[in-house]
Amino acid sequence: MPLLDHSHNPLTDPIRVRAALNSLGLRPAKGMGQNFLIDPEPLKLALAAAEVTPDDVVVEIGPGLGVLTWELLKAAGTVICVELDRRLAARLLVEFASDRLTLVENDVLNVAPSAMLAAANLPADTPYKLVANIPYAITSPLLRHFLEGDAPPEVMVVLMQWEVAQRITAKPGSLSILAHSVQLYATAEIVAKVPSRSFLPPPAVDSALVLLRRRPQPAVATPPDVLFKVIRAGFMQARKKLSNSLCSGLAGQGYPKEQVMAAMATAGVDPNLRAEVLTLDRWAAIAAALGMG
């Protein structure tokens, strides 16, 4: 029976998943983040968080055997899957024979978002959502690939390591370069914690579903390359006060300590604070006070 003819998702059955992997001669590769989701609850939560409707175009990264693909084809209008593993890609085309499914066999980081849409004969300005259980090893570059790409999604619901999810959704006091690189372009919130037992094989850590909603424009107007020069400088010695960390970090860029201290004063930033406390608007104010960009 074709997978889509089942009334319930058959790929949440561990026995069926093991049989499918054996038929492909495939042993889950840790380096490719191949942990197969077998818990139906995170699937339901992901589609609900993304508010997937029959009018939606949805991009999925790393579909694997297709457990999420099955749910997306039931709920969305068009599904575009990007899969690197040739064996899994070939199986998806057989198991999910649908004119609403487009498969791109490639490394997602080598394919521009607009090219994914083009593969489904869609223009680059087509609104779409990204819903995916992403390979954990490429979480940060993958998020940047889409958020900074030529055709960013309106909404992203992604399954990632719990610790990374906490960093991405952090508030002042726990901020990081990663948090700023995401929050510049999107709001971020944790939808649910997903235990390691929800996967086959179980990873060493728990996971989280994270909802990212693209901002109409970046949170601050400072050019990103300029903004992150200042942010990276401040985080070079993250546990030290800004009077030490930021001054030291910017010294190599030709800004003497006196100028940096004056810029912090102009920006209304206490030099006794640490980098993890500063919000994007404060970093932007420092950059402006330094005359950068």
Image: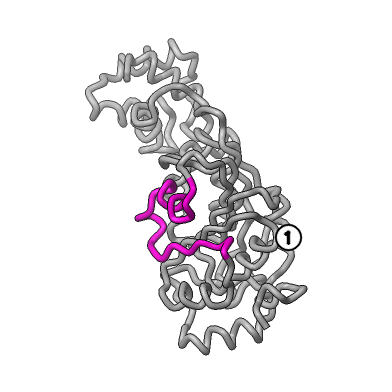
Residue 29 position (above or below residue 219): below
Q: Is residue 176 visible?
A: no
Residue 141 placement, left or right of 98:
left
Q: The N terminus lies in which quarter of the figure?
A: bottom right
User: In percent of the image, x 65 and y 68: which residue is there?
Assistant: 70
On screen, residue 101 versus residue 82, left or right, reads right
Quadrant in the picture for residue 264 = top left
Q: Which residues are magenta?
A: 99-122
Residue 202 appears in the figure: yes
Q: Quadrant of residue 105?
A: bottom left
User: Residue 96: image x %, image y %?
Assistant: 58, 72
- Magenta-drawn stretch contains 109: yes
- Asked if 17 appears above or below 66 in the picture, the reply is below
Nearest the eye: 253 or 138: 138
Residue that numbered label 1 is attached to: 44
Tell me residue 258's x, y (percent): 30, 15
- Badge 1: residue crowd in 10 Å (few <14, some 14–19, many ≥20): few
Q: Amino acid at mark 1?
A: Lys
**Residue depicted at 40% across the width and 50% down the height:** 115
The residue at the point 43 percent across, 57 percent down is 138
| Residue 290 picture location, percent across and down | 34, 16
Instruction: Please indicate whether residue 76 sits to the left or right of residue 223 in the image.
Output: right
Is residue 252 on the magenta stretch? no
Q: Is residue 97 above or below residue 102?
A: below
Task: Give the secondary structure at mark 1.
Answer: helix
Residue 155, picture quadrant? top right
Residue 38 percent across, percent down from the top left: 66, 73
Q: Nearer the viewer, residue 258 or 6?
A: 6
Give the residue drawn at x 44%, y 45%. Answer: 144
